[in-house]
Amino acid sequence: MFSVLFSLFPTKCQSKLTLLGTETLPESDAKLSLLMMRVKALTAEYNLWQKRSPEIISTNPDVLVALGKEELQKVKNDLEMVLSTVQSKNKKLREDLKRAFQELKNKMLKLRTYKEELLNALGEFLEEHFPLPEEDGSAKKKKKVRSFFRKDCSVHILNLMLLVFQILINKLMSTPHEPYLTISDSFWPPYIELLLRYGIALRHPEDPNRIRLEAFHQ
Amino acid sequence: MAAVRPFGKLPALNSAALLLVGSDEGAQQQLAEAILKEKKSFKISIHLATSLPLPSERDHLRPRIDLIAFMIDIKSKYSLKNVEASLAHVDASFFLGKVCFLVTGVGRVNYCSVETNAVWKLRDVYCSPVLYCELELEGIRVATAQRLLRMLQICAGHVPGVSALSFGSLMRNSEDEQP
């Protein structure tokens, strides 16, 4: 309100305003007194607007149409600019996404090869040191064991510690919140024992039939 | 020391004055620089104060203050206390649209020690808008500077047909709709 008044009678208003004392808000009921002030000020502003008659640019319809067209053209230009900015931003984002995805994919491929290598090494190590037990107790020949790995599951193969180990890893990876695995008859007990003894696996504190992989490398 | 008054002095031609009040001088400086960098069609003077009231000795040199922005650092309880104490030295008619609260450091909510409720209470009691910003981020700093500049322009009466009071009421309405 005051700013509008100012433009009308600056000096008259100013002298009146300067005479007004300073008025800070009271500690209690600050909100009420402020709201009362707002009501007064808004009413004054409202009255001022009521008294004003808007200036009309022109009554000539041609002029009005031309002005309207000009205004719309301006809006159209602005919007076009916004559109092109957004489009280029979108394009950039899409490219970034593509690149990030490709990087991830490469990383995953590398990891997969590395995992393969590790598994092969582990398999070789186990073949050497913990060969598959046989009915008569003697160890099988290495090459046969390796071919066993490549073959699909038979109950027989599950005897291998490597597979127990792998199952444990898979379990830990797929359901980290529930890493325990129930020991079934298909696991060869001495391997389980070995895993437990060397701290690679850990028994469930309440259920001795379930084991989990331990962070043995740490 | 007298309270700051919105109409205690005559306005200067084509210029506006902003008063930043806050305990973090670094943030004030940062914001002031960002505001000065913006393109504008009028002269602007920015005054920095850690607290109110302003010292009276150089009062005759100060222009009329058109907008007061109280800066609250969300990481510092003291900054809120400081603002609350300073509010007592502001002329009541300032609260008709010429005051805003600027909450800074919003990007680090983990270190938040000022409750949002306290800020909302200030907004409600003093009927003044709250702006949230993170001055450390350049984009938001620039946007905040632009917002303050626009508000200042309105508060100084440079925008025909929009008064500080009506603008403040508009801001308030949009804020009330928030949960």
Image (cartoon, coloured by chain):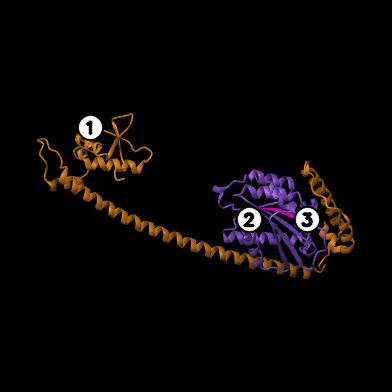
Which amino acid, mark 2?
Answer: Asp
Q: Which residues are magenta?
A: B97-102
Q: Is residue A64 left or right of residue A186?
A: right
The chain letter under disc 1 is A
Mark 2 and mark 3 in contact? Answer it, CB < 8 Å.
no
Q: Earlier in the sequence, mark 2 or mark 3?
A: 3
Work out how far the residue at label 2 is from the one at label 3, CA to CA, in angstroms: 21 Å
Which amino acid, mark 3?
Answer: Val
Provide the residue designation for mark 3: B4
Do pointers 1 and 3 mark residues of a single chain?
A: no
Magenta span has B98? yes
Provide the residue designation for mark 2: B24
Q: Provide residue A36's location: percent of width, then percent of height.
A: 82, 46
Give the color of chain A as drawn: orange
Which amino acid, mark 1?
Answer: Asp
Instruction: Give me the residue at 21% from left, 50% from top.
Output: A121
Residue B37 or residue A131, whichever sits in front? B37
How many residues crowd mark 1 within 10 Å: few (<14), some (14–19), many (20+)?
Answer: few
Q: Provide residue A116's location: percent of width, then percent of height.
A: 26, 52
* Residue A85 vertical placement versus B98 (above, below): below
Provide the residue designation for mark 1: A185
* Residue A131 vertical placement versus B65 (above, below): above
Work out how far the residue at label 2 is from the one at label 1, CA to CA, in angstroms: 70 Å
Instruction: Give me the residue at 25% from left, 36% from top.
Output: A196
Magenta span has A82? no
Chain appearing in purple on the rendered image? B
Q: Provide residue A174's location: percent of width, then percent of height.
A: 35, 43
Tag nearer the camera, 2 or 1: 2
Residue A70 or residue B1, whichever sits in front? B1
Residue B99 or residue A210, whichever sits in front? B99
